[in-house]
């Protein structure tokens, strides 16, 4: 049976995406370091042998696994670069080694644009990363684009402030606003000049629920 592998499957977007793909009748395999090591769905993008083993009969990879927040990257920049860049290189290498040559959809971020002066920001605006997280995403994007020269089918999606789960991090803007509203306290805004585009997780998932190619014949 052919399947789609979702790395970072236990994250905010990953959980919703797996359910959405399954509702469409697609066979999905989850892959995340949040599972216990002996769990069948445990996976680490820094372990190339693990990736090789999990790509058997895989026709596509949605690569969500990452150090996924700016603040986490700032706290541990080495791990941020290792996970986001080297992990992505491993995904590409494993896909290239696989006989099925699975397509790759890579989850990037609006952070690659930095603080653009012209709004709205055009998709082809120049990279202007402002932190280690953004620099790691730029580097990973370049790896994904370079992979096309290896005859891999790849695509990049840049997320912008995805929200929409009760299990979201409580310090993020939308959960913080909701909590303040319930408690009847003022909504605190840090940085009055900041402009952000928020995307509900359901809308983010809709953009990833269509496979890039038909399943190969059995």
Image (tube, rainbow, N blue to C red):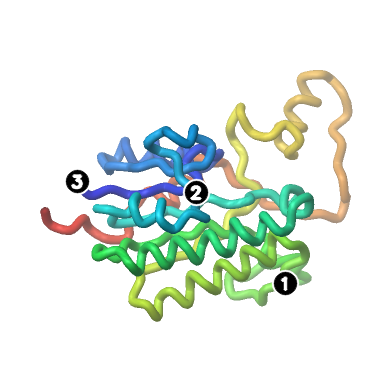
Relative to residue 170, is residue 55 drawn left or right? left
Say the numbered circle drawn on residue 209. Answer: none
Residue at x 40% of width, y 39% of height: 18
Q: CA–CA distance between discs 3 and 1?
A: 42 Å
Which residue is labeled 2 in the image? 44
Q: Residue furthest left?
A: 218
Relative to residue 109, is residue 102 drawn left or right? left
> SS of the residue at dot 2?
loop
> SS of the residue at dot 3?
loop
x and y, in percent, of residue 50 in the image? 41, 51
Nearest the viewer among 200 and 27 is 27
Tag 1: Cα neighbours inside 10 Å, few (<14), some, or many (≥20)? Answer: some
Residue at x 11% of width, y 53% of height: 218
Q: Earlier in the sequence, mark 1 or mark 2?
A: 2
Residue 213 shows in the view: yes
Q: Earlier in the sequence, mark 3 or mark 2?
A: 3
x and y, in percent, of residue 34 in the image? 53, 37
């Amino acid at each position: 049976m052919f399947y789609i592998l979702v790395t970072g499957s236990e994250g905010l977007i990953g959980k919703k995406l797996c359910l959405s793909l399954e509702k469409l009748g697609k066979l999905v395999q989850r892959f995340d370091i949040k599972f216990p090591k002996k769990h069948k769905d445990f996976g680490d993008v820094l372990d190339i042998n693990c990736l090789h083993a999990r790509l058997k009969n895989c026709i596509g990879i949605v690569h969500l696994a990452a150090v996924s927040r700016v603040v986490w990257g700032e706290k541990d920049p080495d791990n941020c670069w290792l996970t986001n860049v080297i992990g992505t290189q491993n995904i590409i290498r494993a896909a290239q080694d696989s006989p099925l040559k699975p397509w790759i959809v890579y989850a990037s971020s609006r952070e690659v644009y930095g603080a653009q002066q012209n709004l709205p920001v055009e998709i082809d605006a120049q990279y202007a990363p402002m932190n280690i997280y953004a620099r790691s995403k730029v580097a990973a994007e370049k790896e994904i684009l370079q992979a096309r020269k290896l005859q891999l089918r790849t695509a990049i999606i840049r997320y912008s402030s995805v929200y929409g789960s009760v299990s979201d991090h409580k310090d993020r803007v939308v959960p913080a606003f909701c909590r303040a509203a319930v408690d009847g306290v003022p909504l605190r805004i840090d940085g009055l000049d900041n402009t952000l585009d928020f995307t509900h997780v359901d809308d983010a998932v809709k953009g990833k629920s269509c496979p890039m190619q038909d399943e190969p014949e059995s």
